[in-house]
Structure formats: C-alpha cells, structure tokens
Image: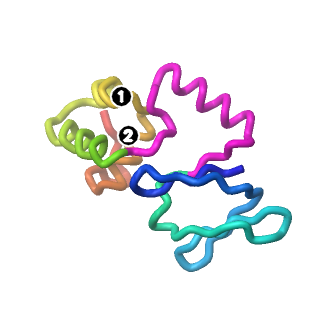
Amino acid sequence: MVRVMLEDTDYCDVPADLMTFDEGVVVFWRDGEEVGRHRQLRIRSLEMLGSRSMGRRIEEARKTFPNAYRSWSQEEEERLAELYRDGVGLDVLVKELGRQPGGIETRLRSLGLLGDDEKLR
C-alpha cells in the first residue's frame, strides 16, 4: 500500500507493489496490473504504508523531529524561507520546524534558496 500525498493536503492510498514513471505520470501497479496513476507534478510525497521498517524509522524520527516525513504546507515553506533569509542557523530551523536537517536542506534546495553543493550551517 502506498499513501500518495497530493497538493492541497489531499491524499489517497493505492494498493500498489510497484511504481513506474511515464512522461510526467507516476503509474502504480499491483501484481502486474495497473491500479492507478497520478501526475507527478501533483504529488508532494509517497509513503509505503505496508513497510514495517520504514514505519519504525518514521516513528523513531518523529520522537525527535515531530514533522519528519510529513508534507510541507505552504505556510511552513514560507516560514522556512523567512527564517533562512533572516540568517537563522540549522539548529534553530530544526527546532522551529520540527524537521530533520536533511529534510530542511532538501526543501531549501527545492525552493531555490540553497545551491546543490551548499550545506546549511
């Protein structure tokens, strides 16, 4: 089972065991048959619901970082950008946003605020 988090905090659970990518579309398969598809641009994140190890990893991460592996809202992205532009360091961003350092860096890169070869301090 795959939870597909879509824009506007919408989501759907797809009974899939395989994903393929086809010209901007993610195609979901189960036992060799297509069970769904979504435009890649609409997808914010994917979560494997049936995976015990990933579930435990998420659970453990959220003990320290309560928002780990959750979709970013527009308000959170705006707050991140504001704090970053104000020169706030990584430790403060982690504490303020409840996110893992890698997730924060990845989001800053996707927002065009941090270069691919830059590290956040």
> Helix, strand or loop at disc 1?
helix
Mark 1: amino acid: Val
Q: Position of residue 78 (x, y in %)?
A: 24, 45
Q: Position of residue 62 (x, y in %)?
A: 52, 26
In the picture, the quarter occupied by the C terminus is: top left
Q: Position of residue 110 (x, y in %)?
A: 36, 55
Identified at 44% across, 32% down, the residue is: 67
Residue identifier under label 2: 104
Q: Which residues are magenta?
A: 46-72
Residue 94 is marked as: 1
Which residue is nearer to you in this view: 23 or 7? Answer: 7
Using residue 66 as the reference point, say whether residue 33 is left or right of it: right
Which residue is nearer to you in this view: 106 or 19? Answer: 19
Q: CA distance from mark 1 to mark 2?
A: 8 Å
Residue 94 quadrant: top left
Q: Is mark 1 in CB contact (under 8 Å) with mark 2?
A: yes
